[in-house]
């Protein structure tokens, strides 16, 4: 499948999934620095637990400055319900201090004024920030056309042959992003996550109940 065919497939997938999930308009979630903290908390954790940990963290420390100044042990206690707290606490403290040292604040709004590639590059220079975290911040906080590729999106995109088998999850960000119209990126991201969670599951995809069968070269494999 060439690039043009892949773009047409993306459009067709989007239309079919929009008939199931409807319109999902973008709206800002957290400010960018908070989104970064939230994203660290969400690694290898359910949405419910990461949200609980995030809200508890803010309830305990009230703002990012206090989190950056806090003892790692106290951060760890505050986020414990989110899991992997011993790993995540030093990561959160470290990246917040790195930002504050660099900017004198946690205001990352200048990223929204940058071309997408430059904004990604700035974020990825932060220790522990990879393409997925950078894309989440730019997409969710600023509505920029960055495509975060999580495990669901990577799996579904590969099954649909939008992303080749040899393309790593990290590289899949740029590949997939280039196939989606900029104004559709957020919605397409949400559609593929929902489809991956509801239907195109990792172990037993529900191919017989999938609306994408005619577009999916993996359909027969999982029937
Ligand atoms: S047909 Fe099966 S493998 Fe293909 S997208 Fe649907 S659920 Fe996934």
Image: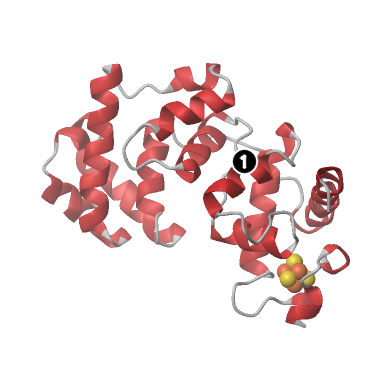
Front residue (pair 213, 166)? 166
In the rendered image, the quadrant that contains the C terminus is bottom right
Residue 196 falls in which quadrant of the image? bottom right
In the image, residue 71 above or below residue 66? below
In the image, residue 151 above or below residue 30? below
Residue 51 can be seen in this image: no
Residue 182 can be seen in this image: yes
Q: Secondary structure at mark 1?
A: helix
Q: Residue at x 61, y 58 (%)?
A: 154
**Residue 28: x, y in percent?**
54, 34
Q: Residue at x 24, y 55 (%)?
A: 87
Residue 36 falls in which quadrant of the image? top left
Front residue (pair 217, 182)? 217
Instruction: Looking at this view, name the residue that lies furthest to the bottom.
Output: 223
Front residue (pair 131, 136)? 131
Ligand 1 closer than 8 Å to label 1 CB: no
Instruction: Looking at this view, name the residue that lies furthest to the front.
Output: 166
* Count of numbered tags: 1
* Quarter, ligand 1: bottom right
Q: In the picture provided, is 164 more to the left or to the right than 202?
A: right
**Residue 120: x, y in percent?**
50, 31
Where is mark 1, residue-wise? 174
Q: In the picture provided, is 103 more to the left or to the right than 165?
A: left
In the rendered image, the quadrant that contains the N terminus is bottom right
**Residue 66: x, y in percent?**
19, 33
In the image, residue 159 above or below residue 53? below
**Residue 194: x, y in percent?**
65, 59
In the image, residue 125 above or below residue 223? above
Q: Residue at x 41, y 46 (%)?
A: 39
Q: Residues within 10 Å of mark 1 (few under 14, many from 20)?
A: some
Figure colour scheme: secondary structure
């Amino acid at each position: 499948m060439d690039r043009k065919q892949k773009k047409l497939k993306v459009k067709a997938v989007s239309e079919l999934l929009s008939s199931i999930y409807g319109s999902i308009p973008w709206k800002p979630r957290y400010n960018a620095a908070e989104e970064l903290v939230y994203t660290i908390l969400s690694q290898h954790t359910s949405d419910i637990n990461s949200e609980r940990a995030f809200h508890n963290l803010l309830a305990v420390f009230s703002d990012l400055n206090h989190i950056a100044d806090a003892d790692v042990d106290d951060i760890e206690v505050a986020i414990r319900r989110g899991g992997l707290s011993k790993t995540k606490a030093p990561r959160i403290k470290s990246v917040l201090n790195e930002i504050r040292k660099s900017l004198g604040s946690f205001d990352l709004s200048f990223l929204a004024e940058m071309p997408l590639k430059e904004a990604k590059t700035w974020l990825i220079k932060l220790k522990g920030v990879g393409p997925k975290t950078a894309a989440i911040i730019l997409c969710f906080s600023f509505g920029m056309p960055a495509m975060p590729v999580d495990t669901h999106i990577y799996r579904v995109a590969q099954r649909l042959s939008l992303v080749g088998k040899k393309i790593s999850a990290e590289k899949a960000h740029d590949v997939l992003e280039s196939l989606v119209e900029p104004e559709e990126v957020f919605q397409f991201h949400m559609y593929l996550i929902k489809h991956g969670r509801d239907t195109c599951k990792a172990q037993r995809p529900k191919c017989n109940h999938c609306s994408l069968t005619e577009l999916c070269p993996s359909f027969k494999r999982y029937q």
